[in-house]
Image: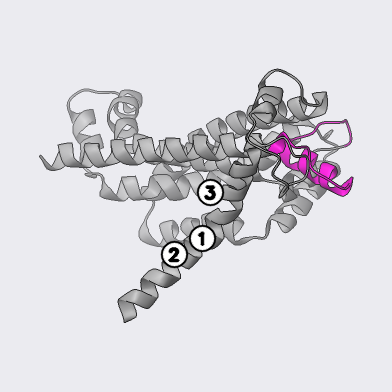
Amino acid sequence: MKKFFAQTYLWLLLAMLYAPILIIAIFSFTEAKVLGNWTGFSTKLYTSLFTGGVHHSLLGAIENTLIIALLAASISTLLGGVAAIGIFNLRNRQKMIMNALNNLPMLNPDIITGISLFLLFVSFGITQGYMTVILAHVTFCTPYVVLCVMPRLQQMNPNIYEAALDLGATPFQALCKVLLPELKPGMISGFILAFTLSIDDFAVTIFTIGTEGLETLSTYIYADARKGGLTPELRPLSTIIFVTVLLLLIVINIRSERANKTKKA
């Protein structure tokens, strides 16, 4: 009986999480401008999305979002990887303090982070735009990368770095040829997580985007919703983003399982 209730609860939870995405995906294959109004199967919205039939501001928002997410995820992965190595090599008490400090930004509400960064940029007279949004995204993405890389460090043989140095490798060579290959799965997971968080963010972005006309996908959707409706092409775009992230996660999980089996063999 307990197993039945546990499975029922799990399926209900999954239904609540994925039903909205499934609805958006289904209605991305119809021309109806209003979600919920099925007017027959059609791929017109996908065609419009890829042939430039959508509003220019939406295309600009998509481009800005991808550029910011790629830059923020890349910088966060680099900083997070280095920070994780540094924290891992600290003494126990220092490591505990640094881990707690790393976890604070993740527990902090996004709106507080956004307001804090906004006040910081204003106090230093920094013009808000592309740079401030990227810096803000790097700020809240880096702790998640550290969290992804740290388990790989804990699983790694702590003597392989010293062994590489004893065999004549320079510290940089040992880092690139020994440490980074071991940390690669964690860094890839951290990159994908940072990329997804950056694309998804609204609260931090709205406070750091400035008034120069820069728009990301989240701010565009917010402005579009305030006008009384959403651009229909957002439905196929949301479906494509979800499917892409899902496929990436599946590929990474398959590669991780194969790597683990190879190590065990």
Say which of 197 and 83 sits in front: 197
Q: Quadrant of the C terminus?
A: top left
Q: Determine the secondary structure under disc 1.
A: helix
Residue underneath mark 3? 143
Picture coordinates of residue 53, whole percent (x, y): 76, 21
Q: Could you tell me the amino acid type at mark 3?
A: Pro
Say which of 98 and 249 sits in front: 249
Q: Determine the secondary structure under disc 3.
A: helix
The CA span between labels 2 and 1 is 6 Å
Residue underneath mark 2? 11
Query: Marks 1 and 2: in contact by CB < 8 Å?
Result: yes
Q: Quadrant of the N terminus?
A: bottom left
Looking at the image, residue 154 lies above or below residue 249: below
Residue underneath mark 1? 15
At 36% across and 60% down in the image, what residue appears? 92
Using residue 263 as the reference point, say whether residue 91 is left or right of it: right
Q: Residue furthest front?
A: 40
The CA span between labels 3 and 1 is 30 Å
Picture coordinates of residue 47, whole percent (x, y): 66, 23
Region rendered in magenta: 211-234
Query: Marks 3 and 2: in contact by CB < 8 Å?
Result: no
Check if residue 232 falls in the magenta segment: yes
